[in-house]
Amino acid sequence: MIDKLEILNLKKVVSFPNHCKLDKKTRCWIWQLGKSMLGYGYYHNNGKTVFAHRFAYRLFKGKLTPGLTLDHLCRNRLCVNPNHLEEVTTQTNILRGEGISAKNAIKTHCLNGHEFFKDTTIICKEGNRHCKICHDRQKESDKSKTWHKQYARKNKEKIALYSKEHRKQIRADPEQLIRLRENNRRTIRKNRADKQYKDMFKNLVSEVS
């Protein structure tokens, strides 16, 4: 065992088990010394700071495979039990975790309730999934906005003249102004209600998924 551990200090190897506490329920070896901001235990070896779980894996199972990382099968970052550690790729490690990427990978529907199928899913270069239905709707919406902007640029004078005539009519008829203001208030209230409904629907979808 000692021959394989070329970089490990013999004193550290002997004292390592003394810094662990056995959890009888989960069989985890809970690290009792230093802890990093991410929740992993760390250890000082030959003047260098190393992660305690990596040190334990190297100590009991040998060298790590280049390009692979260690995943805690018990989901306890302070655990240094080598039987609770598995060599996996970084992507697999992330998807097994509890971060945003892992949560998104589990989802079966987009925010608007469309189910992810091969035909209705777009996968970008980074590997992220996007709903094709929502993407196409957004594209149509963007086209519509672009058309309105182009029309406004080409017909500036017409729009300005129409606005001027419209303002004259409103000033001549005060009741029309009151009606327009009331319609504007209704539209604003309706838009607010629609927004609240959409937010509530998104929250429900996210909770279900």
Image (cartoon, rainbow, N blue to C red):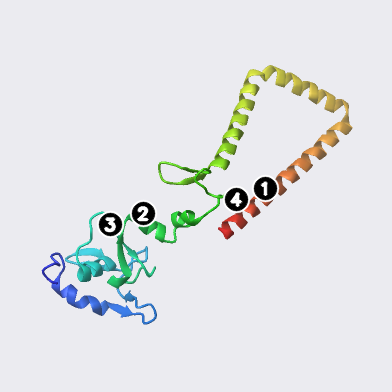
Q: Which residue is mark 2?
A: 91
Q: Identify the mark nearer the N-term, 4 or 1.
A: 4
Q: CA distance from mark 4 to mark 1?
A: 16 Å
The three-letter code of the residue at mark 4 reads Gly
Rendered residue at 52%/47% (across/down): 117
Rendered residue at 24%/64% (across/down): 49
Residue 170 placement (x, y as % from top left): 83, 28
Residue 55 location, quadrant: bottom left
Residue 63 placement (x, y as % from top left): 20, 63
Residue 40 in the figure: left or right of residue 209: left
Q: CA distance from mark 3 to mark 1?
A: 46 Å
Classify mark 2: helix, strand or loop: helix
Q: Does 129 appear above or below 60?
A: above
Q: Which residue is mark 1?
A: 195
Instruction: Give the camera-side residue of 206 and 185.
Output: 206
Residue 120's label in the rendered image is: none
Q: Which residue is mark 4?
A: 113
The three-letter code of the residue at mark 2 reads Gln
